[in-house]
Amino acid sequence: MSENALLTPIKVGPYDLPNRVFMAPMTRSRADNPENAPTGLHAEYYSQRASAGLLITEGSQVSNQAVGYINTPGIHSKAQVEGWKPVTRAVHDKGGHMFIQLWHCGRISHPDFHGGALPVAPSAINPHDRSYTPGGFKDTVTPHALTIDEIHAITKDFKNAALNALAAGFDGVEIHSANGYLFHQFFTSCSNARTDEYGGSHENKARFFFETLEAVGKAIGFGKVGIRLNPSAHGFFGITIDRETIPTFEYIVERLNDYRDLAYAHLIEPMVPVDDVPHAVKEIARHFRPRYKGTLIINCGFDRESGNRVIEQGLADAVSFGKYFIANPDLVERIERGAQLALPDVNTFYTPGAKGYTDYPPLT
Ligand SMILES: Cc1cc2nc3c(=O)[nH]c(=O)nc-3n(C[C@H](O)[C@H](O)[C@H](O)COP(=O)(O)O)c2cc1C
């Protein structure tokens, strides 16, 4: 029955989840303390949304080097791990499941976050974007091209962050390999001009990602690891598509089949129209579903009707909702009842405090 597809149970990794309405990762910038540690407000926010089949947290930096925005939480220090514990406990107390998104911004950052040192990237190519720093928006700079030893060190940071995540009570992790951040910077020619084993061929551009996936999966079990990709991202965060881009993503998605226990692949439909963008794929789920045998989560622009339909059509196993989950803490119940969905206030997406964060009411 089409109207129930989102509400049917699904197994993800080792977990039996009650529905296919997942919460997409969303930066909310409420870790406005010197440690960038989650607080009681985070526990309230996520536990309000615990009826989601799976909650995926906001991007959380794996190291100080990984930071790109103010007030985002981390998962590398003791204070951050301690800060996350009450969050995962509050979600588990309500029967929810929760993965943390592990994040490295790479060149989408600014020297102000790094004591004046340059942000890092595959190559010394300025994304010509803006970074939201403690001193307001600033232009990005030409980043430092990572050495091979430095690349290996970041893989270790992801592994340590994944171990921290389990210590903090998370059910798993999502490697943020989308939206123009560090892994995506390795995938695309506009940001990766390397001539060593981390640039050039599809295999080389994906090497750092797969090395990290292996390290994280071996540390915590592949069933507790998901990944996120945005193959048709174009024109934001310094990413532009060329004729090599989609073949690189096809290579990556097909190779993910080698990790048979992987929790999921989380794919994003084009965030902005790509009808006029040469080489872009317009329908991501339709293009990539036949290429991936594991659990596929699809995201971007879905509502109750289109979410049910994409599952019915066999194009995805689950749907993640972003903005609707901001404004509808009880999104699952609203989908169940066919109730109207509230719209979020964009002005409070990234502002401190409870306003626009924990004050969206559930249906009475
Ligand atoms: C406020 C906000 C913050 C976001 N932060 C992240 C993030 O930290 N990591 C990420 O992968 N995507 C992030 N996204 C993208 C969302 O996960 C999602 O892809 C996007 O909102 C489209 O889904 P929707 O149409 O259901 O909202 C963010 C989106 C919004 C609106």
Image: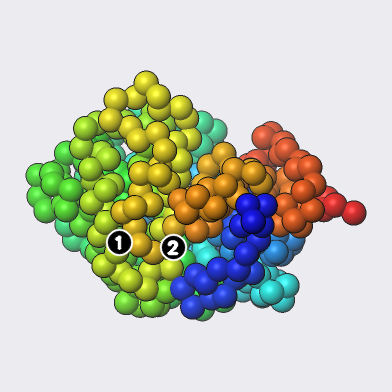
- Residue 256 is labelled as 1
Q: Amino acid at mark 2?
A: Thr
Residue 103: image quadrant is: bottom left
Structure colour scheme: rainbow
Q: Is residue 346 above or below residue 230?
A: above
Residue drawn at the location 44% of the way across and 36% of the way down? 270
Q: At which x and y percent is residue 278?
A: 29, 25
| Residue 358 seen in the figure | no
Looking at the image, residue 83 sits to the left or right of residue 204; the answer is right
Q: Amino acid at mark 1?
A: Leu
Tell which of 79 and 266 is nearer to you.
Answer: 266
Q: Mark 2 highlights which residue?
A: 295
Q: Nearer the viewer, mark 1 or mark 2?
A: 2
Residue drawn at the location 33% of the way across and 71% of the way down? 260
Q: Quadrant of the N terminus?
A: bottom right
User: Which mark is first along the chain, 2 or 1?
Assistant: 1
